[in-house]
Amino acid sequence: MSAIGPSAATRPVRPAVAPTRGGQVANFVAFQLAWFAAVLGAAHQLPLWGTACLLAVIAWHIGIAARPKSEAALVGIACAIGFVFESAVAMQGHVEYPSGQPVDWLAPYWMVALWGELAIALNVTMRWLKRRLWLASLLGAVGGPGAFSAGVALGGAQFVDKPAALLTLTCGYAVLMPLMVWFSNRFDGVSVPEAARV
């Protein structure tokens, strides 16, 4: 023990373990509930309410993570990527939002928060994508526009030019989903450190 306190070897270390089946189920359920809350909140002119639900789920995930700083960093990266991409989509004028958009050419804040929510699933329920970047690209190309279309059906957004919007979303998500998985490999606050370096 040094004069200024316990050495690094003797300090208590928060255990880092892979997500359990129960943890994966909880992550999935929380993800789905918060997604619906955000989309329906925006559709009913209550974007702050939906965003609060998203932030609560994100905070819960970070709070129980083995390494909260890594998960928080991943959430921040996801929000930054989402803000830039969704703002680019908004600038094109192919999509309109009913609420949560202080400036017409910027992404709604609840949409940016949805990207943060995506981040909390990458190291838990979506960790099977970690060594399959090609599959992450395929999932982004198909699942991204699919989820967006579901949001439109619930009233969270509106297509102005549907073919152009879907083309932009398909290409964008096909690139950004594997990028997010790549970042999740480097900012894995859920599993053991060795898994984060693979």
Image (cartoon, helix red, strand yellow):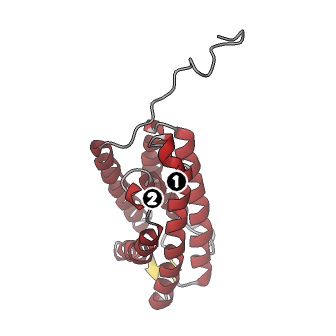
Q: Amino acid at mark 2?
A: Lys
- Horizontal and vertical percent for residue 109? 55, 61
Q: Name the residue at 48% across, 49% down.
A: 55
Horizontal arrangement in the rendering, residue 26 relative to residue 64 (left or right): left
Mark on residue 185?
1
In which quadrant of the rendered image does the N terminus lie?
top right
Q: Earlier in the sequence, mark 2 or mark 1?
A: 2
**Residue 5: % across, % down:** 66, 13
Q: In the picture shown, does residue 80 fall above or below 12? A: below
Mark 2 to mark 1 CA distance (whole Å): 7 Å
Q: Which residue is mark 2?
A: 130
Question: In the image shown, does 132 or 184 lie closer to the viewer?
Answer: 132
Secondary structure at numbered mark 1: helix
Q: In the displayed orientation, state which residue is furthest to the right.
A: 3
**Dot 2: within a 10 Å radius of its alpha carbon, few (fewer than 14), some, or many (20 or more) residues?**
many
Residue 72 screen position, x and y as percent: 55, 46
Task: Give whichever of 105, 121 is nearer the camera.
Answer: 121
